[in-house]
Image (cartoon, rainbow, N blue to C red):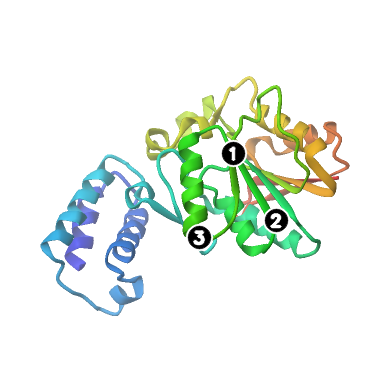
């Protein structure tokens, strides 16, 4: 195993930062061979079989092409659960987990019976919330049928009940819903920000779930907010993950949409990242 880690570091040197290579190595050991970081630190070792060595080399080759390890393994950990992910879905981020924690903490203070997740992707937000809020009616929308298939698979695998529907929030006619919580992590990266992004994101993650035009960066927030004004029950709340560059603009949009209470929060990195709008 130590030789395998050394091989990975050598092959990926110059492509990924050393710390990221180390993290990927430990993740591969855990997911493929059930070997933990503690096992390695304690000097536990074993000889990999021929099939295991071949698998390690094949994955290394894919990593050299900057394919995310989560897509290679077909799964990603999020809020203590493991979700199926594919190139049809975004890879869950730590900032999104912070948003889920905020919603969960608020839900403990009042009874939440229903949640709608617009742009659900893998379903990681919706299914995590449904798992910690037993009995909640959970529904997720997405424009991608491939993403919805992944979300349904995650629902079955985790044993968490939810309904998933193909729906475009920008459509002129939307189905009527009455919910206590509406959450959305919509596309928010502007086209001009592409130059700042990592290649493994640009090459592999779904562009329709990432990018918005430079001339209308808040298009999805405007649409979701407009729908939320009629879909939220009295006392209900809308939660967004946002582009850190548009915190004040998103707050102003929600205020102009008629939400009397709007709260902007920073993530652990100090960036404007989450907004709550309450009725």
**Could you tell me which quadrant the N terminus lies in?**
bottom left
**In the depicted structure, whether residue 235 falls above or below residue 215:** below
Residue furthest top in the image:
215
**Crowd around label 2: few <14 · some 14–19 · many ≥20 (10 Å):** some
Examine the image and state in which quarter residue 189 appears: top right
For label 3, count other residues whose C-alpha is less than 10 Å away and answer few (under 14), some (14-19) or many (20+): some
Q: Earlier in the sequence, mark 1 or mark 3?
A: 3
Label of residue 112 in the image? none
Q: Secondary structure at mark 1?
A: strand
Q: Residue at x 54, y 61 (%)?
A: 79
Query: Which tag is nearer the camera, tag 1 or tag 2?
Result: 1
- Give the residue at the far left of this rendering: 50
Which residue is label 3 attached to? 158
CA separation, marks 1 and 3? 19 Å
**What residue does disc 1 label?**
165
Residue 167 relative to residue 173: left or right: left
Residue 144 rendering spot, x and y as whole percentages: 51, 33
Neighbor class of circle 1 (other Cα within 10 Å; few <14, some 14-19, many 20+) is some
Q: Position of residue 2 (x, y in %)?
A: 20, 67
Query: Real-space Cα distance between discs 3 and 2?
Result: 20 Å
Q: Position of residue 257 (x, y in %)?
A: 82, 32
Q: Quadrant of the C terminus?
A: top right
Q: Earlier in the sequence, mark 1 or mark 2?
A: 2
The disc placed on residue 103 is 2
Q: Quadrant of residue 212?
A: top right
Cβ–Cβ under 8 Å for marks 3 and 2 = no
Image point 31% across, 41% down: which residue?
Answer: 66
Look at the image and tell me whether residue 269 can be seen.
no
Kindly identify the residue that appears in the image at 23 percent across and 50 percent down.
60
């Amino acid at each position: 195993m130590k030789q395998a880690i050394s091989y990975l570091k050598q092959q990926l040197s110059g492509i990924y930062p050393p710390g990221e290579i180390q993290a990927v190595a430990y993740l591969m050991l855990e997911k493929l061979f059930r070997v933990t970081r503690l096992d390695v630190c304690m000097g536990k070792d074993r000889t990999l079989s021929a099939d295991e060595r071949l698998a390690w080399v094949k994955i290394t080759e894919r990593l050299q092409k900057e394919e995310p390890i989560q897509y290679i393994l077909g799964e990603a950990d999020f809020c203590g659960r493991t979700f199926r992910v594919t190139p049809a879905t975004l890879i869950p981020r730590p900032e999104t987990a912070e948003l889920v924690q905020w919603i969960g903490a608020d839900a403990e203070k009042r009874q939440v019976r229903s949640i709608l997740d617009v742009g659900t992707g893998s379903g990681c937000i919706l299914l995590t919330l449904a798992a910690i809020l037993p009995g909640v009616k959970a529904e997720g929308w997405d424009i991608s049928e491939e993403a919805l298939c992944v979300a349904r698979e995650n629902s079955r695998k985790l044993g968490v009940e939810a309904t998933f529907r193909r729906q475009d929030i920008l459509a002129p006619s939307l189905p009527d819903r009455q919910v206590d919580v509406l959450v959305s992590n919509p596309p928010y990266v502007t086209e001009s920000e592409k130059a700042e992004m990592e290649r493994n994101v640009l090459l592999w993650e779904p562009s329709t779930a990432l990018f918005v035009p430079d001339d209308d960066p808040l298009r999805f927030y405007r649409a979701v907010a407009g729908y939320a004004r009629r879909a939220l029950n009295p006392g209900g709340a809308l939660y967004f993950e946002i582009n850190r560059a548009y915190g004040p603009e998103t707050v102003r949009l929600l205020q102009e949409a008629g939400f009397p209470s709007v709260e902007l929060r920073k993530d652990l990195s100090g960036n404007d990242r989450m907004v709550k709008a309450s009725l």
